[in-house]
Amino acid sequence: MIKIPLPDWHPEKWQYYEHTKVKHELLRKYLKGWISILGGYHERICYFDCFAGRGEYTKNGETIEGSPIIALKLAKKMKKYYGEFLITLIEKDKDNFENLKQKIEEEGKEDKIHIYFYNASFSEVVGEIMEYLEEKNSQLYPSFFFIDPFGFSDVPSDLVAKILSYRKTEIFFTFMARDINRFLNSEKHENALSMLYWNDEWKKAIRERDRETALVKLYEKQLKEFGNAKYILPFKVCMDQIRQTVYYLIHASNHFKAYKLMKDIAYKQSDGRFGFFGPDDNTRSLLQFRDPVDYIKEYLLENFSGQEIIMSKLMENYYVNTPYIKSDIWRALQKLQEDRIIKITGLGSRGGYRKNAVITIP
């Protein structure tokens, strides 16, 4: 018996699960930091909710706010940080769209917040915006694109590349790894998969033992090679009751500060595991079994032996190439200096290290 896919407005699609809560918590925490940082440097900042949905979920009869409401409430609460906040809400399904507009109206508006509604597809709306910017040879204001589809059929790779071609843009993408893996052998879904990726290299994953990992790694690789992304951070999300992947949340950006902010938040929210593996999962990450001092010592001596390196450059290198964050790296460097394995010159006024401190590795 063929199972007919549920329409996007169907109530079953808007049940609130623990893995959805995890996604929204990451979004909320990141947007809070993003608004305070970008708003301080730029008069106008933009939030795009590219599959905005209904604006609400339900759980046991209770109504829970969706991502557009999360963004609006944060913008209202943090209005002292920016001059103008532009919110673009895109939703293709007519029923969802009308419900979303109603929920936004119930929340009320602020003078500094401008909201734009589009009852159309992500590719149509953002595609037209990108074409307009290209024609006018104009820049895009600092923008955060939350791309959260139910499936994977309307996230064309060329459009993702255009978004990330602007220096001050970033995406937070729900990469539907389970569904992609499920339909990997389906001829019906071949065009959608070829549109999602930049070429047909995804077909090689069919022969991989761990197809899920291969598909995610390939998308990350192509995001960098063809999609202009300099920094990428994946966050694995499993189902509520069983340890089976639902999707990966992939953050892609062009600025180290954006990457660092997301990594710090994801690290703390998941106890260093960069994933949600079910509410009752008590397994520990490899990070928790190994002292970062040993790990960082090995990495430092292996990659920078006989060199001098500036602290800010070293910190960025560690953030991108090791599973640790600043507190772990800082502690490791202090211990290595105490043990005379490295030498650090350039203390700050309060005893900490300056960004331009010099680390000498024998």
Image (cartoon, rainbow, N blue to C red):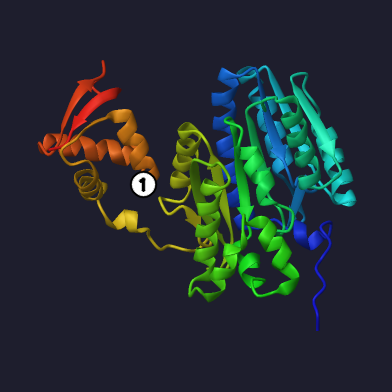
Image position of 39 with respect to 21: above or below: above
Quick check: 325 left or right of 246?
left
Q: Position of residue 240 (x, y in %)?
A: 59, 63
In the image shown, does 162 or 339 lie closer to the viewer? 162
Residue occupying image coordinates x 34% and y 39%: 317
Q: Quadrant of the N terminus?
A: bottom right
Q: Quadrant of the C terminus?
A: top left
- Could you tell me if residue 314 is visible in this image? yes
In the image shown, does 300 or 132 lie closer to the viewer? 132
Image position of 42 with respect to 337: above or below: above
- Outermost residue, bottom direction? 1
Secondary structure at badge 1 equals helix
Residue occupying image coordinates x 78% and y 63%: 12
Q: Position of residue 344 (x, y in %)?
A: 18, 28
Residue occupying image coordinates x 80% and y 76%: 3
The residue that mark 1 highlights is 321
Image position of 329 with respect to 215: above or below: above
Residue occupying image coordinates x 63% and y 24%: 78
Residue type at the position of mark 1: Asn
Q: Position of residue 89 (x, y in %)?
A: 78, 39
- Outermost residue, left direction? 340
Q: Residue 319, located in which quarter of the rendered image?
A: top left
In the image shown, does 165 or 274 lie closer to the viewer? 165
Q: Position of residue 316 (x, y in %)?
A: 37, 36
- Could you tell me if residue 106 is visible in this image? no
How many numbered markers are drawn?
1
- Callout 1 crowding tier (Cα within 10 Å): few <14, some 14–19, many ≥20: few
Quick check: 270 left or right of 301?
right
